[in-house]
Amino acid sequence: MKMIRAIIRPNKEETVLSTLDKAGFSSLTKLHVFGRGKQKGIQVGPILYDELPKLMLVLVVEDKDAAKVVGIIENSARTGNIGDGKIFISSVLEAYTIRTGEQKL
């Protein structure tokens, strides 16, 4: 299994979530976060906004579905401007359902 963490613009939330849902990937965790990338925020006149609001989506999918999910997120979150976000993928060794104790490998 793969864990996909995508950090996207908040205004792309509806588009990304509906596209994932239509493709059958509706199980996810959504967190409102703040952060900055290489540009270290944005300068608007004399004011520096060094941390910008972002949305982080966390999904765990089967290995075979990881590339499809990444493609969906990239295509539906992209504006072509700096600050579109990042996607991180890591392996999941084990997962447990709390209610039943079931282990998923």
Image (cartoon, rainbow, N blue to C red):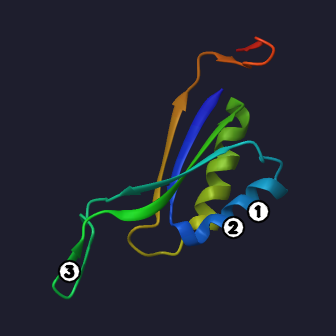
Q: Which amino acid, mark 1?
A: Ser
Dot 2 surroundings within 10 Å: few (below 14), some, or many (20 or more)?
few
| Image location (x, y in percent) of residue 97 | 74, 19
Q: Which residue is mark 3?
A: 47
Q: Which residue is mark 1?
A: 18
The residue nearer to you, when weighing 1 against 42, is 42
Residue drawn at the location 75% of the way across and 42% of the way down: 27
Image quadrant in which you'd find residue 45 = bottom left
Q: Farthest residue to the front: give it.
A: 99
Residue drawn at the location 83% of the way across and 48% of the way down: 24
SS at circle 3: strand
Q: Which residue is mark 2?
A: 14
Q: Which amino acid, mark 2?
A: Glu
Assess whether mark 2 and mark 1 are in contact (beta carbons under 8 angstroms): yes
Image quadrant in which you'd find residue 19 = bottom right
Dot 3 surroundings within 10 Å: few (below 14), some, or many (20 or more)?
few
SS at circle 2: helix
Q: Nearer the viewer, mark 3 or mark 1?
A: 3
